[in-house]
Structures are given as C-alpha cells and as structure tokens.
Amino acid sequence: MCRIGQSPFTAGPPTVNNRIQTSFIYQEVKLRQSLRLRGEMAQKGVQLDLDTISCSVCLDLLKDPVTIPCGHSYCMNCIQSYWDTEDEKQIHSCPQCRQSFTPRPVLVKSTMLADLVEELKKTGLQAAPADHCYAGPEDVACDVCTGRKLRAVKSCLACMISYCENHLQSHFDVAQLKKHKLVEPSEKLQENICSRHDEVKKMFCRTDQQCICYLCSVDEHKGHDTVSAAAERTERQRELEGSRHNIQQRIQDREEDVKLLQQEVEAINGSADKAVEHSEKIFTQLIRLMEKRRSDVKQQVRSQQETEVSRVKELQEKLEQEITELKRKDTELKKLSHTEDHNQFLQNYSSPCLGGSKYLSNINRYCLRYFEDVTAAVSEARDKLQDVLSETWTNISLTVTQVDALLSQEPKTRAGFLEYKCKITLDPNTVNTRLFLSKENREVTVMYTAQSYSSHPDRCTNHYQVLSRESLTGRCYWEVEKGTGGLSVVVAYKDSDTVAKRFGDNDKSWALGVYKRRSEFRHNNLKTPVSAPLSSRVGVYLDHSAGILSFYSVSETMTLLHRVQTKFTQPLYAGLFLDGPPENSAELCELKRVSVKSSLLRLLFGIISHSSVCSSAPPARRVLITQQTSTDPQLRQVGGT
C-alpha cells in the first residue's frame, strides 16, 4: 500500500514527481475534509458534490483510480482507452486540462484513492448516475450552476430562481431565506415577472382577469378591481373546492348509476338466460312430441300397409287358384270340342258354372284413399302449425322481456295490449240514478226510471255517466262493448268538476264518442271528428307515466281511432257516458291473455286425432293415428311447463 505522498509512478523527472506528490497530498487532505463535511451534510438529507472522486470521463465513482502527472484522477480503463486513441499522434493529454505528456506515462493504481472511494461507499454516499444528476432536455435546470447544469429540485417564488440540491442548501441554512416559498421545479417562473416593470406579479386584476405587478395596479390597471394574488387564490381555492365537491358528488352519483345499470344488465342477462333455458326445454318437449307423433303415424301407416298388402296377396292367391281351375276346365272343353262323336260330345258336355267372385269390385275403393287422407291430415297439421307460429310470434317477442315498460313503447298487436289488461269495475257511488249496474258492476244500462242510490258527493247527477272504482296508473288496457245507442269511452280525473259536467267538456276528462253514423274525440269542450272505421268494441290503452292515451277499434285487427300525448298529473279513472234510448247499455269486457303455449298444444294434440282421416275413412278400416286425452303424460308434461 502506498504511503501518503508516495508517487504512484515508477519513474519520472524530480519536478514532475514533486508536483505529483504535492497534488496527491492536497487531494488527500481535500478528500478527507470533503468526506467529513459530506458525512455531516448527509445527515441533513442533502445530496453531496462528489466531483472530486468521480471520473470526468465516465462520470461515475473512480474504479481502479490513477492520477496522471497534471494531478487529475481517472479510472484506469477510462484514461487508457482515451490515450489509446492518441497513440498515433504520440502525444497524450489530460481530458480535462489538455496538458500533454511525452512519452505516455505509465499508470499505476492509486490505492489511497481506492481506499477513500471504498470508505465513501461504506457511508452510503455514491455518485449518482449522470442521467439522475444533470438536467436533461425535459428537466428544469438549476439557474445558479455554471457549465453543465444540474437538475433543479425546487423553485423559489421569492427569488424567482430554480435550484439544484447543492445551491438550495442556503435556503435551509440562512434564516431570511427560510421564509421563501419553495415549490416544485417550474420552467414558467419567468411568467411571474412583469415584462413591463420587471417586477413579480403579486396582484390580480379582476377587471381584466390577469395577474399584474404592483406598478401595473397604479398604472394601466388604475381604477380596476384589483386584489392580491394570494387573496384571489384563496377565493378561487374555495370555488375550486366547491367545484371538486360537486364533481365528486357527480362521480358518486354516476358510480351509483353504473352500479344500477350493471344490476340491470345482470337482471336482463339472468332473465334472458332463464327465458332461453325454459324455451329450449319447451321446444325440446314439443320436438319430442312431434317426433313421437311422426313415429306413430309412420308405424300406423306401415301397419295399414301390411294389412292391405296381406289382404291383396290373399285375394291374389285365390284368384290364381281360380285361374288354374279355369285353365283346367278350358283344356277339357278344348279337348271335348275336337271329339267327332256327337253322342260322346253331348254326353260329356254340360254348361259350365262360371259364377266368378267379385273380388275386384271393391279392390281400390279404400286402399289408396287411406294413405291420401293421412298425407292430407299431416299437411293440414303443418299448415295450421305455421299459422299459429306466425300469428303468435309477436306475442312471444313481447312477453320475453319487461324492458318495454321502461322504454314506453306502445304495443302493436292486440295480444301485446292484452299484456297490460286490467280488471275494472264501475263505482256505484258515481253512477247516475238513471243507470243500472249489473254483471258484478261491469255492465251499465239506461233505465226508464231513476234507481235508488244513496247520496254521494261523487255521483254524476247531470248526465248518464259513471266512473270506475279503480284508479289507473302505469300501463293499462281495457275494452268496452257498445250497445245499441251512443257511447263515450272516457278517461278522467275524479273531482267535483268532472262529475258535474259531461265527460269531455272540461280539461280533466278525455272522451271518445261512438255513435251510429259518426264518432268524435272530445276534450276541454273541443270536438275532433274521427273518420276511422268503427266496430262495436273500443279498446283503450293508457301509459300514465308516458302521458299516452290511445283509443282503438277492436275487430279482427286493431285500428287506431285517436291518440293523445300529454302529461297526466293525477290518478285517472275509466268512465262511460251513455246516450240514446232506454235499454242502451255498455259493458267492460273481461279480457284474457292469449296463451301462445296453449294455442300450440291445442294444435298439436287436436289436429291429427280429430283430422279428416278418422271422419272420412269407413268404419271397417278407420285408423286412429293417435288417441290423445288429458291423461296423456306428455300432454301433462308440456302443459305444465
């Protein structure tokens, strides 16, 4: 190990060796002092300047350090590689001071520097990589550093300068500088300097909505509404917090909405999966049933085929026997015809009995008709099944999902309307005294004389009309069967003004009048003619939340008579107004939903067993393709799904 002051070079001029020795002693003292100082500064969390033990070529801590004659130290590999590039010139220089040496100095590792570097490493102080120390293109550089600038770690709003770790230390040591406001490094510090007065912008002009310096406030912004930037920041900070609170509240609301929508998605998926599962199960059962019917038809057709073929073959054998017998007789007669003896001919010849059987008379009467009838029956079943599927498919699509209730989509078919059927009865407390209620308060009839009803504030006293007992909310559908006279089908609020006036003469009732030769819609005493074709039955569809009220003429098809789009503010009631002679009546119809499954089952179980095959075939050869009753296990299985 080299002693302090001993030259690391094996030979050289005395002057050079003395200079190296002096440089080495100075460097050792400097490093010892630097090490002690850096240890103290490290305890304060301050990054140290380790340039004295860093290689200026690789910018890292010295590795196998050597000191060249000018006194600068490098990693052995770094300086050797550097000098290798100068061998052609035969002049070798220092990368830092550019001092040249001839001949090329011999390098020897400086164990003293190596020990110092190791000692520094033990204290945890290592030179940071250059990329972490020096300012890059995207970093804020220290405004105090000269030469290659280090990366700034803080910016001072009082000094309007950015500092690296080293130059920031004074802000922690000097009492006056400790009061300065330090922020994260910013390249926009100069924007805080007034370009006109070269002063810090510490004021804010509310009139022009911009930051200004104090001189601006008494110059071009004189008379404006100005406050300190800190005061404006405080006020806007409160606004910002309020905005953040509102945004956070909206975020929470939206997150709740997202959760609800996710739950809705899960509900939709679950409902759809369940519907698909049940539908697959039902259709599988129906397919199995159809397969069984197909097998039964095939088996019975083959059985009938075997019977008929056996019958025909039996007949064929009998005919062949008869042919043989006839041929034998023909041979005898032929032989007799050639006999020349007249007496012998007359003795042997007798008139043959040819009373043949009538096997052929009915041979084709029922044989082929049976199979034709089977084909016709199966074709009829196919056609009727196709018709049922075509007519009920809209029903299936409407009943699969409940989402339409949210979308307020009005049904398109009567089966769709029947999904919203509601049971309505007429209120005896509102019926006019000349009206009589029957059929469990579903039918109303005009009477010749007044009926005995108790006094009630809701009673219609001036007109032959009545309201329902039940209020109507959500989606509802009902139908009214018209009698011989005029009729108004009504939807109304229930209050004293409504029952006192004729339905349709105020803004609280909507009435569709159906008469013998005309019809009209009436609301708020305004009449609108209705030109659509009429039937004896009127359907009413109400979507209270969507504000939709529609009147339909119900026959084989649904014909829209009139549609109202408004906003309902109270519960609604169904109503009837009767016009015309006594005994005119109207009835709230009892409605039943169309069952798609029952229609299919009735078709599947009824067509073949009651087809024309059984009715048209003769009793002797009638075939039952399948006798199905309510005890059929497959019928119970499918019907109960």
Image (cartoon, rainbow, N blue to C red):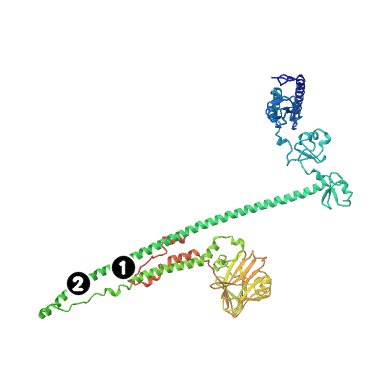
Q: Which residue is denoted by mark 2 in the rendering?
A: 325
Q: Residue at x 43, y 59 (%)?
A: 288
| Image location (x, y in percent) of residue 186 | 77, 42
* For marks 2 and 1 on the same chain, the one whose residue lies earlier in the sequence: 1
Q: Which residue is denoted by mark 1 in the rendering?
A: 308
Q: Taking 526 as reference, is 544 above or below it?
A: above
Amino acid at pointer 1: Glu
Q: Residue at x 71, y 24 (%)?
A: 105
SS of the residue under disc 2: helix
| Image location (x, y in percent) of residue 23 | 76, 23
| Disc 2 versus disc 1: nearer the observer | 2
Q: Is residue 521 left or right of residue 51?
A: left
Nearer to us in this view, 127 or 357 = 127
Nearer to us in this view, 605 or 338 = 338
Q: Is residue 244 left or right of residue 319?
A: right
Quick check: can you spot residue 246?
Answer: yes
